[in-house]
Image (tube, grey):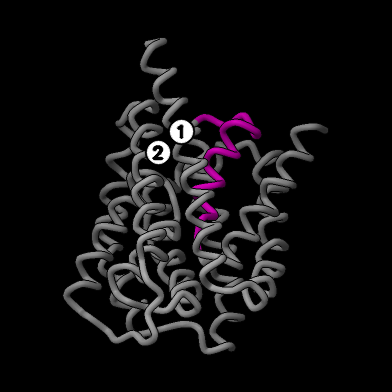
Amino acid sequence: MTALVLALLAGAVVGLALGALGGGGSVLAVPALIYLGGLRPDEAATASLLVVVVTSLLALPGHARAGAVRWRLGAVFAVAGVVPAAAAGALARHVPAAVLTGAFGVVAATAAVVLLRAREPTADRVRPVRAVGAGAGLGAVTGFLGVGGGFLAVPALVGVLSVPMSAAVGTSLLVIAVNAGAALVARLGDVTLLDWAVVAPFAAAALLGAWDGKRLAARVPATTRRRVFAAALLAVAALMAVDAARAAVAG
């Protein structure tokens, strides 16, 4: 019963993050599924991708109706990451869990710094070369770490491609769905092995949380959301770094 309650609470937070921030779902889902759900890192990565794909696809229409999705930029960004995501996802299955955990922490901390240093732009335009480069890099990280990539997509869209936070949130959901879907393809054989007693309630709570997150996004200033997002990333990075160090000492 305790595991079920924790799965429901954690899933709701993940969905809330996706709906309100356009990312952070998987960067929160992976640690939650490991530390609260009792899944192994590779199992948590697969479950996270599945949850994030479904939740992102369901949350995307609401942002689209509000005009907060840059379809052209998002398409270029997402398509550039498909092949790297699938290739890195296959490679990650042969990498030790401690290495994945440490890499996860480093990437999360880097994304937080980028997001905190980014200035809120007033307008955006498509930059194909930058979009392709950032998209390919994001796809590789998505596949390797088993994350949806939203926690990197938002900083990249705001800090590298100068997309306003309001549009970055909706656009990142498109990128997340495509990248996470490509990474999940490389792990389809692992889906049937998941502990669905934990994953199913987690996913259901995430779906409900995403609806509330969309409403929350309309009420909270973009600067505040950006800072909250960065703080959550730093907290996760610290947790994963400690865990990786502990595993290295034990090994």
* Residue 206 against residue 43 in the figure, above or below: below
Task: Give the mark, 2 or 1, whose residue is nearer the N terminus.
Answer: 2
Residue found farthest to the right: 1
> What segment carries the magenta color?
23-40
Identify the residue shown where x is 83% and y is 33%.
1
Q: Quadrant of the C terminus?
A: top left
Q: Is there CB contact under 8 Å for labels 2 and 1?
A: yes
x 42%, y 30%: residue: 241
Residue on which the image places disc 1: 240
> Splitting the image into 4 quarters, where does residue 104 fall?
top left
The image shows residue 152, relative to residue 103, as above or below, that is below
Q: Residue furthest left?
A: 129
Magenta part mainly helix, strand or loop?
helix
Q: Is 226 above or below relative to 233? A: below
Percent across and percent down for residue 21 are 54, 65
User: Who is closer to the viewer here, 2 or 53?
Assistant: 2
Residue 181: where, in percent of width, then height? 43, 60
* Type of the residue with mark 2: Gly
Image quadrant where residue 123 sits: bottom left
Judged from the image, the secondary structure of the residue bearing numbered disc 2 is: helix
Residue 33 is inside the magenta segment: yes
The residue at the far top in this view is: 250
Going by the numbered disc 1, the residue's amino acid type is Met
Instruction: Tell whether 50 sits left or right of 200.
Output: left
160 with respect to 63 (left or right)? left
Residue displayed at 67% across by 46% down:
10
Question: Which mark, residue 105?
Answer: 2
Quarter-of-image position of residue 219: bottom right
Pointer 2 local density, CA inside 10 Å: few below 14, some 14–19, many at least 20: many
Residue that appears at 39% across and 21% down: 245
